Amino acid sequence: MKQQTWLDDELTLAGALRQGAELLWAGFRRSFLTLSLIAVFGVTLGAAVVWGKHEYAPRFVLRVIEADRDPSSMPRLSGQLNDYVRQAIFTSAPLFDVIERNGLYPNLMRHNPRAALDSLREDISLEVYRNYFVEQRAPGELPRSARLALSYRSRDRVKALAVTRELGNLIISHELEVRRAQALEAARAAEIARDSAQLAVQQRSQEALSMQRRIREAQAPNPELQVELVGLLGSLDSLERRAEATERRSASLELGAAFEKRGIGLRFEVVDDASLASGHEQQREREWLGAAGFALGIPLVAMAVGAFAPKRGRSA
């Protein structure tokens, strides 16, 4: 014999629909109470739609794309973009500037600026997705990219939009400036290494030439001088290869610095500029949602009344 389970006691779909219809009919039979509750529900919902406080959180989306060049010749972008933006870009100084320019949290700024800064950070949403910078890229592979979405939440529509766009532009300007400085510093260091290697080649060449003159001017063959000359020529070959490598490295980094200086080393494409619908359009959208909620709420109210209605045949 098959053992009964709790699922066997549950209503079928047809049974559930039949029971719902019975509750709905029982609710509408108590028309005065049902209509009164529907009226209260409608007034409450309408007040929430018309006078309710609404928050705005426009979405600013950036696509970050690296240049199609050897990644070793460019400044490295952190793969952990979310942490990098919050900790390296959204630091205290630029965020305080954002607060002051937009008049955010005036009471907190007067009494506790640090609390105002924390409030701004809490109202910023940051999301990184399609992030391929977490993977290593070998020379010859396609450039990596990532998408970064941010928004600032506020009850003031204008401030929400302005602050969101300002934060997005802050990311772009900060990263371009930092990468220019990094690329220029790397190019300078490579130039110093190149000059040092070339100077070492010149000095070793002069030492080899001097040794050759000594051997030619010697009255008799000197094996020790010849062995020393062989050593000098061998080290000269090594120094020349090193100088060529540093020269190639310097040229590559100089080109990278030129790319970064012109803002084409790492590109930022604005996928979504955080545009919001007009206030009138948003109000109409809320009204439509309210109307839909009211229409769906009518049978629910009637069923709730029917669920508590006295059953037929029940004694008073």
Image (spheres, rainbow, N blue to C red):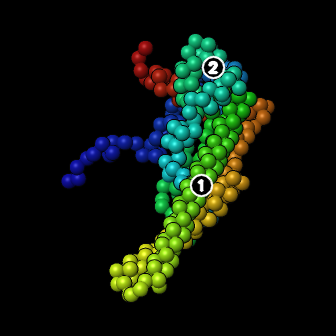
**Looking at this view, is 41 or 48 the one in front?**
48
- Dot 2 crowding, Cα within 10 Å, few <14, some 14–19, many 20+: some
Q: Residue tagged by mark 2?
A: 105
Could you tell me if residue 316 is visible in this image? yes
Which of the two discs, 2 and 1, labels the residue nearer the N terminus?
2
Q: Nearer the viewer, mark 2 or mark 1?
A: 1
Q: Residue tagged by mark 1?
A: 188
Compute the Cα span from label 2 to label 1: 44 Å
Residue 221 sits in which quadrant?
bottom left
Amino acid on which disc 2 is placed: Tyr
Q: Residue at x 65, y 47 (%)?
A: 176
Lateral position of residue 168 relative to residue 316, left or right: right
Q: Residue at x 79, y 31 (%)?
A: 280
**Looking at this view, is 202 or 24 the one in front?**
202
> Can you say which quadrant of the picture contains the C terminus?
top left
Amino acid on which disc 1 is placed: Arg
